[in-house]
């Protein structure tokens, strides 16, 4: 696949059609004598710039779904297309390049190189994508400022608080200006307030850069204004209306801005 160079936000409007299309996707795993159906007949079309919140209990298939979209896993059946390219047709090299250029992944447990500085962690994807050395440091520090960590760029990742680690991970996810951010329970290891700050950052990146965001969470009462809301249960995905359920204990409604 001939991947175009990274697109800047202002060019994104020129992308026609859905950024993601999932057609009748299933994914099953063998576990001993059993076949676990992690995803069943999932259909989804996502337009550029949308924010999707996919909620579901533990074991419902959330991580499996994101892994398919990131090209980290392949479906047992059905098709996954990303900007029109069928991901199941990519070889290993094209797939690595696709992940580096098109997808920013944010994990519950950050996955930073803890002995490396914040700056070095954010620089890593730029090395892989061949950005010249001088530009790398400038872009990485720009991203760290963007996520609110300008003064921590020389700090080792291992010395940062959980919230600061997730900010670094977010800067790393956006440094190559991906089309899509996949966020797998990014607030699950954070306290309520810090988690809210990470959600606000995701919302502002979505709005300002038109970066498509898919956020998965087991927080049943989470609602994000302007997002499309989905419910995933036992591998089946359904779209819901996004009205927050009022006054539920621990409910959270994010409006960004
Ligand atoms: N690599 C795997 N091998 C076997 N079973 C798996 C594997 N990955 C996920 N599963 C199973 O698939 C189901 C969905 O898992 P997962 O996508 O991780 O759910 P969630 O992220 O919503 O908690 C679970 O039953 C899980 O045990
Ligand atoms: Mg998971």
Image (cartoon, grey):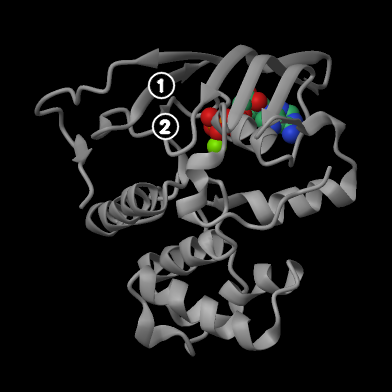
- The residue tagged 1 is 230
Residue occupying the point 59% across, 35% down: 63
Q: Specify the quadrant of the image occupied by residue 26.
A: top right
Classify residue 44 by image quadrant.
top right
Where 151 sits versus 188, above or below? below
Residue at image coords 47%, 53%: 9
Q: Is residue 79 visible?
A: yes
- Indicate the position of residue 179 as horizontal and vertical percent values: 56, 47
Q: Describe residue 208's horizontal placement relative to residue 108 as left or right.
A: left
Mark 2, residues whose alpha carbon is within 10 Å: few (<14), some, or many (≥20)? many
Residue drawn 64% across and 49% down? 102
Q: Which element type, helix, strand or loop, lies under badge 2?
A: strand
Q: Is residue 18 above or below residue 153?
A: above
- Measured as percent of width and height from the top left, residue 215 is found at 44, 39
User: Residue tagged by mark 2?
Assistant: 52
Quarter the N terminus occupies: top right
From the viewer's perspective, tell me whether residue 196 is left or right of residue 39.
Answer: left
Percent coordinates x, y for residue 117 in the rendering: 55, 84
Of discs 2 and 1, which sits in the foreground? Answer: 2
Q: Is residue 85 above or below residue 98?
A: above
- Mark 2 and mark 1 lie on one chain; the one further toward the N terminus is 2
The answer to whether the beta carbon of the residue marked 1 is less than 8 Å from any atom of ligand 1 is no
Q: Is residue 117 visible?
A: no
- Which residue is nearer to you in this view: 37 or 6? 6
Q: Secondary structure at mark 1?
A: strand
Whether residues under marks 2 and 1 lie with C-beta atoms below 8 angstroms apart, the answer is yes
């Amino acid at each position: 696949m001939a991947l175009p160079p990274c697109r800047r936000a202002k060019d994104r409007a020129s992308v026609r059609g859905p950024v993601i299309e999932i057609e009748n996707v299933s994914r099953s795993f063998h576990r001993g004598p059993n076949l676990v159906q992690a995803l069943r007949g999932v259909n989804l079309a996502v337009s550029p710039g949308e924010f999707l919140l996919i909620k579901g209990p533990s074991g419902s298939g959330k991580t499996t779904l994101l892994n398919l979209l990131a090209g980290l896993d392949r479906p047992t059946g059905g098709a996954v297309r990303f900007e029109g390219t069928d991901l199941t047709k990519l070889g290993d090299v094209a797939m690595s390049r696709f992940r580096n250029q098109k997808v920013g992944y944010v994990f519950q447990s950050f996955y930073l190189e803890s002995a490396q500085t914040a700056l070095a962690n954010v620089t890593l994807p730029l090395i892989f994508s061949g950005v010249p050395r001088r530009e790398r440091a400038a872009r990485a520090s720009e991203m760290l400022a963007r996520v609110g960590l300008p003064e921590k760029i020389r700090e080792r990742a291992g010395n940062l608080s959980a919230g600061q680690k997730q900010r670094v991970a977010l800067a790393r996810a956006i440094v190559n200006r991906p089309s899509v951010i996949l966020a797998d329970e990014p607030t699950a290891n954070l306290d309520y307030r810090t988690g809210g700050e990470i959600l606000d950052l995701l919302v502002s990146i979505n709005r300002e850069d038109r970066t498509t965001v898919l956020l998965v969470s087991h927080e049943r009462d989470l609602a994000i204004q302007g997002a499309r809301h989905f419910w995933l249960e036992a591998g089946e995905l359904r779209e819901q209306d996004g009205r927050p359920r009022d006054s539920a204990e621990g409910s959270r409604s994010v409006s960004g801005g």
